[in-house]
Amino acid sequence: MRALANDPAARALEDDAAVLTLETETLVITQDALVSGIHVREDEDPADIAWKLVTVNLSDLAAKGAEPVGVLISHMLGQGDERFVEGLGEVLRAYDVPLLGGDTVGSGGERRSWTCTALGRATHTPVPDRRGAHEGDTIYVTGTLGLAMLGIDEDERNTESEADLAYRRPRPLLAEGRALAPLVSAMMDVSDGLLLDCQRMARASGTSFHLDSRSFPVADPARADACARWGDDYQLLFTAPPATAIPVTATRIGLVKGRNDAPLWIDGKRPEDERLGYQHR
Amino acid sequence: MRALANDPAARALEDDAAVLTLETETLVITQDALVSGIHVREDEDPADIAWKLVTVNLSDLAAKGAEPVGVLISHMLGQGDERFVEGLGEVLRAYDVPLLGGDTVGSGGERRSWTCTALGRATHTPVPDRRGAHEGDTIYVTGTLGLAMLGIDEDERNTESEADLAYRRPRPLLAEGRALAPLVSAMMDVSDGLLLDCQRMARASGTSFHLDSRSFPVADPARADACARWGDDYQLLFTAPPATAIPVTATRIGLVKGRNDAPLWIDGKRPEDERLGYQHR
């Protein structure tokens, strides 16, 4: 499909969102789908599915420094629809986002999927791109990595602990994204694991990322490596010139260097294994 | 979900699309999904699915007089993906629409679905609404009804006949919609059958529609009734004040009257049966 996306607004499908420049406005548009059994557990509370469906898209807007103007939802009808609508109402109120439209379709009772399109208004142009990292920039990540992974444990489930909420009710970092947008050279949200997303940003920017694993802000030091490979945290990964004052809480995790024979280096070595994070098919 | 869609841009989820007013632009946004076995045949050529997925959304833009600015596609991976991308390329080139983004997800090999979001720029404001029909207006429909229904016959399949193309390769009436937008009081596309969509427009407008069935522009007079109840033709249904000069080929099919005890009257009678067209679940 990449070959078809030759309009500059599509950002070659390499960024988290499309950026559409109109006369006086710049729109940021993103669309992500969740599939039952792949992105959410088969027995997930539909209210949590609705929350996640909207927030994964709002997180893409956050990474572009955009302010949400509305969402459209395609919902496959089935069991738990009332709970889905409850969760949808909760997330829309929490982020003050209008539901603009969408579609409800039958599912035939099999594997269900949900799609959300989120539209936002850029608060800063140029809109941060994941292709903008430069040699010499510092690499940062917000928050803590791996909380959502800890929340997936059966013992944590529905306890409303920090980890449970990180998994079931992720929070898109909209305010942080807006504060960072004018300052960063590149930004994206960490949806598929820090290492994998660092590799993607390095590749998209034509650079190499050199990370110091001891600096990773992990939720569980005993499982540090897993925390750096697990997705679902929706933290912001960004790069900025070294002298930049960073207005949000973020951890310095490495340095951007020029393109060389690998996009990703951890503690001076290339990662040996191939599975750096969650690879969508 | 309707209760959640309280922003005016959502048009109470009663219209074909959301209408978002920005500083100097008015955007029209629509999202429709196709599900295998429900909206498309299980053995449909994926290139035809891609064509239809995009054109059903462009048809909603046409009904709002909007000019497409881009689409986002969520595609469930599976058999025939190369054909899907071929068809997608064909339809995007045919209507000069950029692919802005989207998502590809695994399907687990079961029933597949596809979602498209189309964005357009309004060419006329106020943007035509299906809620705008007034007592005294004339009701019109463009083109011929039932061609797509005839195209579903096995004998027609892949013959490239008019009926086969109407079914497999519907054409969104973008130029017609733009020409009509400044003149109509209400407009929508006929996606679920003329009678059902007339009933919806009458209800949404708080009026009653009085149709003359002998005037319906049907593809097959021997199956006139079925032609008026079958969807997939994507013609434009619109109302306009009686003296309006209509700049496109369209047939006058009835008259708008005030609200009374039924929204739809055919040849002076209420339709007896409940199945007026294709009812989505």
Image (cartoon, coloured by chain):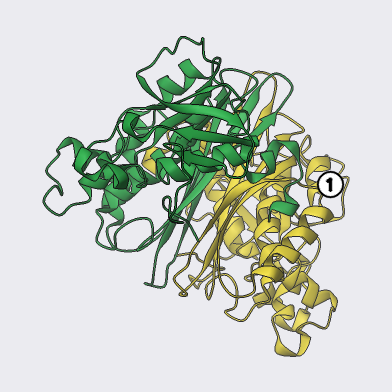
Chain colours: A green, B yellow
**Residue at 58% of width from left, 29% of height from top?**
A257
Q: Chain of mark 1?
A: B
Question: Hey, which quadrant is residue B147 in on the image?
Answer: bottom right
**Residue at 57% of width from left, 36% of height from top?**
A208
When the figure is inspected, residue B93 is found, relative to residue B46, above or below; the finding is above
**Residue at 83% of width from left, 56% of height from top?**
B94
When the figure is inspected, residue A91 is found, relative to residue B21, above or below; the finding is below
Answer whether residue A56 is visible to the viewer in this image: yes
**Residue at 53% of width from left, 76% of height from top?**
B37
Closest to the observer, B235 or A105: A105
To which residue does mark 1 refer?
Answer: B175
Image quarter hosting the C terminus of chain B: bottom left
Q: Position of residue A147 (x, y in %)?
A: 25, 39
User: A19 left or right of B164?
Assistant: left
Q: Position of residue A165 (x, y in %)?
A: 22, 39
Instruction: Say which amino acid is labelled 1.
Output: Ala
Give SS at disc 1.
Answer: helix
When the figure is inspected, residue A55 is found, relative to residue A277, above or below; the finding is above
Question: Hey, which quadrant is residue B69 in on the image?
Answer: top right
User: A10 left or right of B103?
Assistant: right
The local crowd at label 1, few if under 14, some if 14 to 19, many if 20 or more residues have their Cα within 10 Å, is few
Residue at the bottom extreme?
Answer: B155
Q: Position of residue B253 (x, y in %)?
A: 74, 58
Answer whether residue B16 is visible to the viewer in this image: no
